[in-house]
Amino acid sequence: MLSPAELFAVRSREQSLPQRTHGQKDFLPDGSQIQNEKLQICRAERRELLAEEHVERLGSLGAGVWKPEEELVELTLPAGKFWQTMGFTEEGRQCLLPEEAVYLLECGTLQLFYRDLPLSVQEAYENLLSRGPVNLLHYQVYGHLKRLGYIVTRFDPSLLELPYERQINLESHVVSNRKRKRNSRYR
């Protein structure tokens, strides 16, 4: 929690990002002194950006608890509009898949706890993405698509219609089951 003076200081500091004048070609090694200087400047800008303290209003943060045995995050305080495209309800609890929770933690809209301690983004990568069906590479694809504005869900093989089901016209039965399964883990 910040004092009023600290909060005012954070709000009144300059909010500009460093100017990126470095292109991809600047990172192909050529061994020159000029390139080394550009790389040092770029690294310093990145360190400065990563060291920047981010302040969020507690009222706009959701909160969740990582349940490793169930491989999900149970929301204890839902907040934000993310619930429209993320999460599911299971046994009356609002839950998130690990990739959804990490994404919201990165975005600064979710506080994530494990064993009553808040998780950093790095700890969330380690705890939520190190085991289970979604690894870091899968998450990077998921996060990229979410940042582009796509609604991303896990594939549910039970929603596939088999040739036999089509042959005996089970489609009407499958459609009615899909409506009931909407709140399931894989939507």
Image (spheres, rainbow, N blue to C red):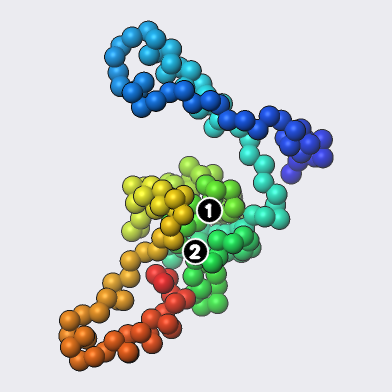
Residue bearing mark 1: 104
Q: Secondary structure at mark 1?
A: helix
- The residue located at (55%, 61%) in the rendering is 82
- Give whichever of 11, 7 is nearer the camera: 11
| Image position, residue 11 (x, y; %) | 73, 37
- Judge left or right: residue 116 versus residue 184: right
Q: Which quarter of the figure has residue 134?
A: bottom left
- Measured in 3D between alpha carbons, the distance from the residue under mark 2 to the one under mark 1, in whole angstroms, is 10 Å
Query: Which amino acid does the dot numbered 2 rest on?
Result: Met
Q: Secondary structure at mark 2?
A: loop
- The residue located at (62%, 30%) in the rendering is 16
Other-residue count near label 1 (Cα within 10 Å), few / some / many at <14 / 14–19 / ≥20: many
Query: Which amino acid does the dot numbered 1 rest on?
Result: Leu
Discs 2, 1 touching: Cβ within 8 Å: yes
Residue bearing mark 2: 86
In this picture, is 161 found above or below 88?
A: below
- Judge left or right: residue 30 versus residue 5: left
Q: Which quarter of the figure has residue 37?
A: top left
- Residue 172 seen from this side: yes
- The residue located at (32%, 89%) in the rendering is 172
Give the residue furthest to the top: 33
Other-residue count near label 2 (Cα within 10 Å), few / some / many at <14 / 14–19 / ≥20: some
* Quarter that holds the C terminus: bottom left
- Residue 98 seen from this side: no
| Image position, residue 38 (x, y; %) | 43, 16
- The residue located at (52%, 47%) in the rendering is 106
| Badge 2 or badge 1: first in the primary sequence | 2
In this picture, is 54 found above or below 170?
A: above
- Judge left or right: residue 2 versus residue 147: right
The tally of labels here is 2
